[in-house]
Image (cartoon, grey):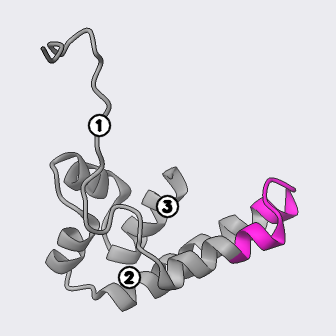
């Protein structure tokens, strides 16, 4: 996910820190993309171009198979994008939140 966020920030033309702040503030990737005037199609293309070298390295390092890389790239080309329509959900500690009755 770390590499995804870094690649997404680059695709949007903003820093990784800015994207993390926007996501932490409750924005989805699509909202950030709209603010940056980046279409979903352009975002997908740039995201894939940014992630491909890291995925290639993972295959070379035997952390992924070539088939796994292909599956990931195909999902990014045509499937729902992680964080596109929803902001990330932050984990809450159960000790700090009241239990439901």
Q: CA distance from mark 2 to mark 3?
A: 12 Å
Residue that mark 1 sits on: 90
- Report the front residue among 88 and 19: 88
Give the residue displayed 38% in from the left and 90% down from the top: 42
Along the horizontal axis of the image, is 72 left or right of 69? left
Question: Is residue 60 magenta-colored?
Answer: yes
In percent of width and height, residue 18 lies at: 26, 56
Q: CA distance from mark 1 to mark 3?
A: 17 Å
Count of number-bearing discs: 3
In percent of width and height, residue 14 lies at: 30, 67
Q: Which residues are magenta?
A: 58-70
Task: Name the front one of labels 1 and 3.
Answer: 1
Residue that mark 2 sits on: 43
In percent of width and height, residue 92 lies at: 27, 25
- Report the front residue among 98 and 72: 98
Up/down of 39 relative to 63, above or below: below
Q: Which residue reaches farthest front?
A: 101
- Report the front residue among 68 and 55: 68
Residue that mark 3 sits on: 4
Along the horizontal axis of the image, is 25 left or right of 84? left
In percent of width and height, residue 65 lies at: 83, 64
Along the horizontal axis of the image, is 91 left or right of 25? right
The disc, 2 or 1, on the residue closer to the chain's N-terminal end is 2
SS at circle 1:
loop
């Amino acid at each position: 996910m770390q590499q995804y966020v870094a690649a997404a920030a680059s695709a949007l033309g903003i820093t990784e820190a800015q994207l993390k702040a926007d996501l932490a503030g409750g924005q989805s990737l699509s909202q950030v993309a709209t603010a940056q005037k980046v279409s979903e199609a352009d975002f997908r293309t740039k995201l894939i171009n940014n992630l491909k070298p890291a995925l290639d390295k993972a295959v070379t390092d035997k952390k992924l198979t070539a088939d796994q890389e292909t599956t990931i790239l195909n999902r990014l080309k045509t499937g729902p994008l992680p964080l596109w329509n929803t902001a990330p959900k932050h984990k809450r500690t159960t000790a700090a939140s009241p239990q439901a009755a």
